[in-house]
Image: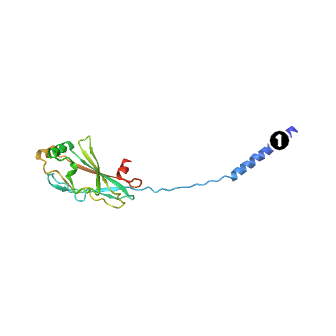
């Protein structure tokens, strides 16, 4: 009798477990959500429409140079332009001899309403970099005003000072863009 009782109890337990399994199966649910993200696009071009390479550079002569950035990407962007001048020590020595304290004075037609100088960086390779921010967000498809419109080696520079600059004196311009979304200022954007 004891054995029959164990068998009945085991069968009852098995039926209970099966019933619970069926109940759990009926109380299940599953959902799936797929999010598709379209990646943005920040892309720029840097041009100097008026620039013509002179054979030689002469003090006091203004050469047309108009760095301009166009946003050819799909997203609005903050813009930074870096202007790196070579032979910094020689240029600085000559400028100081004539009372010039700011190399930025060689760039004519700079519009501070459009561009703000962010930094002056003396580099280890005898160059100096002037960093500028465009003051407003550059919309997709838009073009900045020129950072400046001309470059002039000071008229007071002597032939010895010009020789000290060397034959490879150069001005290199680079432009950077970063998405405008999420940043209130260009300084915030480029600090990130």
Apparent side of residue 94 relative to residue 4 in the rendered image (left or right): left
Residue 166 visible (yes or no): no
The residue sitting at the bottom extreme is: 141
Identify the element where label 1 is drawn: helix
Residue at the top extreme, as displayed: 2
Residue 58 screen position, x and y as percent: 14, 52
Q: Residue at x 37, y 50 (%)?
A: 188
Residue 27 % position (x, y): 68, 52
Residue farthest left in this picture: 159
Which residue reaches farthest right? 1
Residue for point 83% across, 43% down: 8
Q: Is residue 38 above or below residue 1?
A: below
In this view, the residue in front, 105 or 58, is 105
Q: Quadrant of residue 136?
A: bottom left
Q: Position of residue 165 (x, y in %)?
A: 17, 45
Q: Which residue is mark 1?
A: 7
Q: Nearer the viewer, residue 30 or 149?
A: 149
């Amino acid at each position: 009798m004891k054995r029959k009782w164990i068998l009945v109890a085991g069968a009852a337990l098995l039926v209970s477990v099966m019933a619970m399994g069926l109940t759990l199966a009926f109380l299940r649910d599953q959902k799936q959500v797929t999010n598709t993200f379209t990646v943005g696009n920040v892309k720029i071009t840097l041009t100097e429409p008026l620039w013509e390479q002179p054979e030689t550079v002469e003090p006091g002569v203004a050469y047309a140079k108009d760095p301009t950035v166009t946003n050819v990407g799909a997203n609005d962007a903050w813009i930074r332009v870096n202007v790196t001048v070579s032979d910094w020590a020689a240029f600085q020595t000559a400028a100081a001899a004539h009372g010039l304290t700011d190399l930025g004075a060689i760039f004519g037609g700079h519009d501070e309403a459009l561009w703000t100088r962010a930094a002056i960086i003396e580099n280890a390779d005898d160059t100096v970099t002037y960093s500028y921010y465009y003051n407003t967000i550059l919309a997709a498809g838009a073009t900045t005003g020129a950072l400046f419109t001309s470059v002039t080696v000071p008229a007071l520079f002597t032939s010895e000072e010009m020789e000290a600059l060397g034959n490879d004196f150069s001005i290199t311009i680079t432009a950077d863009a970063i998405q405008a979304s999420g940043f209130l200022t260009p300084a915030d954007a480029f600090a990130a």
